[in-house]
Image (spheres, rainbow, N blue to C red):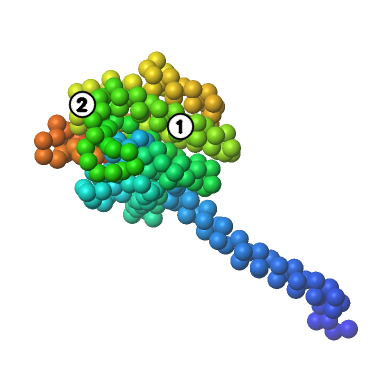
């Protein structure tokens, strides 16, 4: 027997076929898994964020500021009846995909809530509140002015939060990793001298009606499974007549974006 022959392993035809089948199965499995890997990579680099809140609080405007795009003033007057999508991109090939849930209590809103909290659960939530200064709107996004006192708007805001909080809790208990929530107190340009007081009202442990509801959410979801931040922000600060200078308004939006990056592991 030659030296070369001594080191050759001759497999039976059936064994060679089995090896070939195993290799082919591995290749097909790798190809089939490629979309899943790509999806996971996209999810890490561009986590999805639900933007929730009652109608008139400025969800779309805030998402536009975070995505660095201009706001359609005509659309802002009546709000959207369907879920809107925005994307924020950075130079490091990362960012966020924002899903803006309609604020009107309609079938489209309920469907959007199901999508972001059940069908395709998001990575985080920005719940937008406005300290009772949400723009009053007629039902179903119809045009025209509406009247509502600040107390009425605060009550509506609390009712809206109760609905959203239950869905966040339901999502959190199903997840194998913690869920983060940022309560964004928008329209800060309307109360620039009361920011600390207003932020405290929305914070867990504050003893306020809203703070009590946040405490209930943490109890339902489990404190270790849900992180909560409260940050002031202004989508219209710096505009003509605003009490908030442009630099300060931009700094508030930048602070929110930085916190989102920290929560998502981008920094």
Q: Which of 119 and 70 is in front in this view?
A: 119
N-terminal of the pair, mark 1 or mark 2, is 1
The label shown at residue 229 is none
Q: Is residue 151 above or below residue 106?
A: above
Q: Which residue lies furthest to the bottom in this view?
A: 2
Q: Residue at x 75, y 71 (%)?
A: 21
At mark 1, the secondary structure is: helix
Q: Residue at x 48, y 51 (%)?
A: 43
Crowd class of label 1 (few under 14; some 14 to 19; many from 20; radius 10 Å): few
Left or right, 3 with reference to 169 = right
Residue 126 spot, x, y in % from top left = 39, 37
Residue 237 seen by the camera:
yes
Q: Residue furthest right?
A: 1
Distance of label 1 from label 2 (alpha carbons): 27 Å
At mark 2, the secondary structure is: loop
Q: Quadrant of residue 91?
A: bottom left
Residue highlighted by disc 2: 191
Q: In which quarter of the image is residue 14?
A: bottom right
Residue highlighted by disc 1: 163
Q: Which of 114 and 81 is in front in this view?
A: 81
Left or right, 64 with reference to 189 = right
Crowd class of label 2 (few under 14; some 14 to 19; many from 20; radius 10 Å): some
> Which quarter of the rendering shows the C terminus?
top left
Q: In this view, does 5 lie above or below 105?
A: below
Residue 123 seen by the camera:
no
Q: Residue at x 88, y 83 (%)?
A: 1
Q: Which residue is drawn at 40% across and 21% down?
A: 211
Left or right, 208 with reference to 13 = left
Residue 38 spot, x, y in % from top left = 52, 58
Left or right, 3 with reference to 43 = right
Residue 161 spot, x, y in % from top left = 41, 30
């Amino acid at each position: 027997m030659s030296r070369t022959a001594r080191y050759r392993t001759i497999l039976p035809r059936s064994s060679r076929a089995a090896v070939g089948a195993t290799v082919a199965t591995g290749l097909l499995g790798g190809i089939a898994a490629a979309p899943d890997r790509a999806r996971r990579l996209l999810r890490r680099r561009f986590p999805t964020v639900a933007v929730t809140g009652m109608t008139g609080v400025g969800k779309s405007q805030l998402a536009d500021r975070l995505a660095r795009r201009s706001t359609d003033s005509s659309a802002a007057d009546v709000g959207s009846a369907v879920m809107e999508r925005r994307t924020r991109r950075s130079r490091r090939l990362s960012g966020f995909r924002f899903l803006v849930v309609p604020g009107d209590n309609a079938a489209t809103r309920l469907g959007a809530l199901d999508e972001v909290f059940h069908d395709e659960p998001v990575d985080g939530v920005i719940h937008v509140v406005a300290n009772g200064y949400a723009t009053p709107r007629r039902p179903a996004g119809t045009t025209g002015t509406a009247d509502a006192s600040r107390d009425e708007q605060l009550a509506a805001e609390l009712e809206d939060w109760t609905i959203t909080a239950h869905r966040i809790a339901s999502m959190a208990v199903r997840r194998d990793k913690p869920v983060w929530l940022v309560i964004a107190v928008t329209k800060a340009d309307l109360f620039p001298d009361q920011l600390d007081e207003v932020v405290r009202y929305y914070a867990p442990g504050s003893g306020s009606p809203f703070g009590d509801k946040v405490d209930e959410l943490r109890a339902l979801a489990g404190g270790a499974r849900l992180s909560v931040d409260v940050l002031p922000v202004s989508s219209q600060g710096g505009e003509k007549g605003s009490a908030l200078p442009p630099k300060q308004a931009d700094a508030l939006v930048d602070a929110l974006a930085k916190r989102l990056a920290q929560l998502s592991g981008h920094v």
